[in-house]
Image (tube, grey):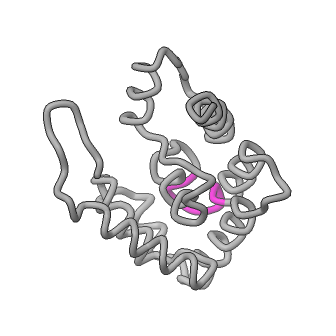
């Protein structure tokens, strides 16, 4: 369950994310409907020019792009950092994914939930609370930092 200082989310909050993870696992791609579900899950705005531009694309084009990102982040021969960078780079061809990592990291995490991580202001604040300061950090660097944190916690 996701938590925020002073509040908790409903126990069913992550059902949407889990559904998208299952569909991405089965299909090897993520379409516009699942991106919309992730927008809702992340509580992002969809009344933006990029959302309209994304909706104007054929779903097959969106799925082709997200399939390339999924292939990259699932590639076990790549380090987590390199896989994240490659997945993030693949997504830059889609409207809404050219800048910012909040939605992109959600897409990458649904593709490889055991390898990737959500990066947004909550993650940024959590890392800061651990004494890790990241500023305008590419998602690949974030994944490298999180891998190190995970290794330190597990040892």
| Residue drawn at (29%, 48%) of the image | 2
Magenta stretch containing residue 2, yes or no?
Answer: no
Q: Main secondary structure of the magenta part?
A: loop
| Residue drawn at (65%, 34%) of the image | 151
Q: Where's residue 44, x and y in %?
A: 31, 53
Residue range in magenta is 91-97
Q: Where's residue 152, x and y in %?
A: 62, 28
- The relative height of residue 59 versus residue 142 in the rendered view (above or below) is below
Specify the farthest residue to the top.
131
Residue 6 placement, left or right of 116:
left
| Residue drawn at (66%, 31%) of the image | 148
Q: Quadrant of residue 65?
A: bottom right
Q: Where's residue 73, x and y in %?
A: 69, 59
Residue 84 placement, left or right of 102:
right
Q: Nearer the viewer, residue 95 or 124?
A: 124
Residue 58 placement, left or right of 44:
right
Q: Quadrant of residue 25?
A: bottom right
Residue 123 placement, left or right of 141:
left
- The relative height of residue 64 versus residue 88 in the rendered view (above or below) is below
- The relative height of residue 95 versus residue 60 in the rendered view (above or below) is above
- The relative height of residue 40 versus residue 151 in the rendered view (above or below) is below
| Residue drawn at (65%, 37%) of the image | 147
Magenta stretch containing residue 93, yes or no?
Answer: yes
Q: Nearer the viewer, residue 43 or 84?
A: 84
Q: Quadrant of the C terminus?
A: top right
Q: Where's residue 56, x and y in %?
A: 47, 76
């Amino acid at each position: 369950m996701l938590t925020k200082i002073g509040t908790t989310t409903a126990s069913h909050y992550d059902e949407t994310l889990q559904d998208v993870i299952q569909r991405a696992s089965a299909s090897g791609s993520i379409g516009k409907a699942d991106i919309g579900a992730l927008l809702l899950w992340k509580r992002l705005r969809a009344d933006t020019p990029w959302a309209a531009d994304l909706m104007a694309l054929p779903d097959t084009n969106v799925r082709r792009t997200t399939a390339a990102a999924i292939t990259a982040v699932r590639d076990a021969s790549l380090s987590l950092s390199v896989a994240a960078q490659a997945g993030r780079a693949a997504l830059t061809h889609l409207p809404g994914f050219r800048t910012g990592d909040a939605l992109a990291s959600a897409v990458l995490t649904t593709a490889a939930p055991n390898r990737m991580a959500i990066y947004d202001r909550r993650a940024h604040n959590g890392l800061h609370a651990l004494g890790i300061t990241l500023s305008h950090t590419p998602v690949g660097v974030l994944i490298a930092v999180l891998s190190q944190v995970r290794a330190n916690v597990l040892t």
